[in-house]
Each structure stands twice: as C-alpha cells, then as structure tokens.
C-alpha cells in the first residue's frame, strides 16, 4: 500500500528490514490456537482475570510474556537435561 509520507521504494524497504529480528509486544496470540501449555489464549486470559480477582495489577499488559518466558525456560532446561543425560558418562561414587 502506497503511503505518501514514505519516500522510498518497496525494494528499499525490503532491504532495510532484511535480517531484522523484532521483540515487539504481542501480549496475546490473536489466533485461537492451543499453546504448548494446552491452553487457548482466551483460556489463559480468563484464568489470569480470575486469579487477579477483577483487580488491575501492575504488569497486567505483560503478564502473558512472563508466562511465556517461564515456559521457554522450562523447555530449554528440559532439552538441556535430555542432551546432557544422553552424553554424560556418570559414575557412581558408591
């Protein structure tokens, strides 16, 4: 879509963003897909609201990112354990 405020070509825009990795905020997945937790985004939101008791708490807008971060850490630790268990030649001291 052409924007008169943008004075570069589509090719220049593609070149400018090539390799860009964005960590912008997407609080809740807009698609209704089950996450690795087994929850739908709407189920997570409902559970959080119930736990908060209807109160607006500090961090409300980023609570899902914290939840995702804990999942990412747990998955990484599990995978690391799997790799180390397979490679470790452990010997008993008993």
Image (tube, rainbow, N blue to C red):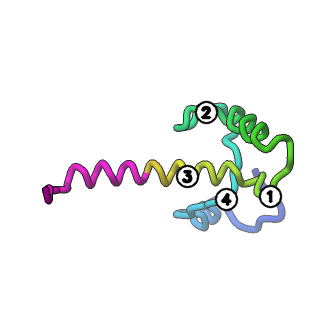
Q: Position of residue 59 (x, y in %)?
A: 76, 57
Q: Earlier in the sequence, mark 4 or mark 2?
A: 4
Residue 37 drawn at (x, y percent): 55, 37
Q: Are marks 3 and 1 in contact (CB under 8 Å)?
A: no
Q: In the shown orientation, is residue 26 left or right of residue 81?
A: right
Reading the chain from its start, which is encountered first: label 2 or label 3? 2
The front one of 18 and 71 is 71
Q: Residue at x 52, y 38 (%)?
A: 36
Q: Which residue is mark 4?
A: 24
Q: Is residue 61 left or right of residue 41?
A: right
**Tag 3 residue:** 70
Q: Nearer the viewer, residue 5 or 47?
A: 47
Q: What is the span of residues highlighted in magenta in the rendered image?
A: 76-94
- Identify the residue position indicated by label 2 in the image: 39
State the CA–CA distance, disc 4 to disc 2.
Answer: 22 Å
Mark 3 vs mark 1, CA separation in Å: 18 Å
The Cα–Cα distance between marks 2 and 3, rounded to whole angstroms, is 15 Å
What crowding class fits label 1: few (fewer than 14 Cα within 10 Å), some (14-19), or many (20 or more)?
few
Secondary structure found at label 1: loop
Of circles 1 and 4, which is in front? 1
31 and 68: which one is in front? 68
Q: Is residue 81 magenta?
A: yes
The residue under the point 77% across, 53% down is 61
């Amino acid at each position: 879509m052409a924007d008169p405020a943008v004075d570069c070509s589509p090719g220049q825009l593609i070149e400018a963003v090539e390799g860009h990795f964005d960590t912008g905020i997407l609080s809740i997945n807009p698609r209704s897909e089950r996450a690795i937790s087994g929850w739908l985004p709407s189920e997570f939101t409902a559970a959080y609201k119930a736990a908060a008791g209807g109160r607006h708490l500090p961090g409300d807008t980023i609570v899902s990112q914290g939840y995702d971060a804990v999942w990412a850490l747990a998955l990484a630790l599990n995978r690391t354990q799997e790799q180390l268990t397979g490679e470790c030649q452990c010997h008993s001291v008993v």
